[in-house]
Image (cartoon, rainbow, N blue to C red):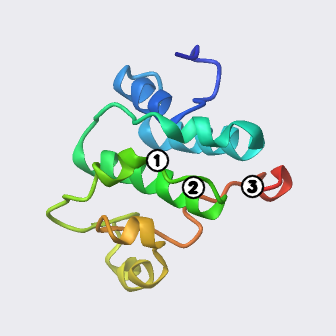
């Protein structure tokens, strides 16, 4: 496991650091994305191991992140994503604003939508992602 001063280098690391209270979920995911986009040679490894279970929405979100990143970066989709996060009972809309629901329904990438998680089209973008050779 990484030290608190390092960015999470895998989705498993994200879940462990969130569970330990080292980082909030949103912060850990953003930090992971920064690392993922910068380290192109290790991307497959960073998605390979399933994260520890947190709670249903977060578990589904991490599975969607792994699937979406794998597909957009032309990597193998880890098998664990099919076992996780496909059982939400109610849809989850990022941001929580009623006025955004229609937009999120349209924009949400497939990996999120099929898990009943609705996010913006650029939910996984980071300021440095384009410079990192995504």
Tell me the quadrant of the picture where the C terminus can be found: bottom right
Q: Residue at x 53, y 41 (%)?
A: 47
Q: Is residue 114 above or below residue 51?
A: below
Query: Which residue is label 3 attached to?
Result: 127
Q: In the rendered structure, which disc, 2 or 1, sits on the residue that comes first in sequence? A: 2
Asked if the residue at tag 1 contacts the one at tag 2, i.e. Cβ–Cβ closer than 8 Å, the answer is yes
Callout 1 secondary element: loop
Q: Which numbered dot is residue 41?
A: none
Query: Which residue is label 1 attached to?
Result: 78
Q: Which numbered dot is residue 70?
A: 2
Q: Determine whether, in the image, residue 103 is placed left or right of residue 115.
A: right
Local crowd size for mark 3, using a 10 Å CA cut-off: few (<14), some (14–19), many (≥20): few
Could you say where residue 8 lies in the image, as x and y percent from the top left?
57, 29
Q: CA distance from mark 2 to mark 1?
A: 8 Å
Q: Residue at x 39, y 63 (%)?
A: 94
Q: In the rendered structure, which disc, 1 or 3, sits on the residue that comes first in sequence? A: 1
């Amino acid at each position: 496991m990484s030290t608190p001063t390092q960015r999470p280098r895998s989705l498993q690391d994200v879940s462990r650091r969130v569970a330990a209270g080292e980082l909030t979920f949103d912060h850990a995911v953003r930090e992971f994305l920064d690392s993922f986009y910068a380290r192109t040679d290790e991307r497959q490894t960073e998605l390979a191991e399933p994260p520890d279970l947190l709670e249903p929405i977060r578990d589904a979100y991490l599975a969607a992140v792994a699937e979406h990143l794998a597909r957009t970066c032309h990597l193998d989709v880890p098998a664990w994503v099919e076992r996780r996060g496909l059982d939400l009972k109610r849809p989850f809309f990022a941001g929580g604003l009623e006025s955004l629901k229609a937009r999120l329904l349209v924009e949400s990438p497939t990996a999120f939508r099929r898990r009943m998680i609705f996010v913006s089209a650029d939910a996984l973008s980071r300021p440095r992602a384009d410079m990192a050779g995504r």
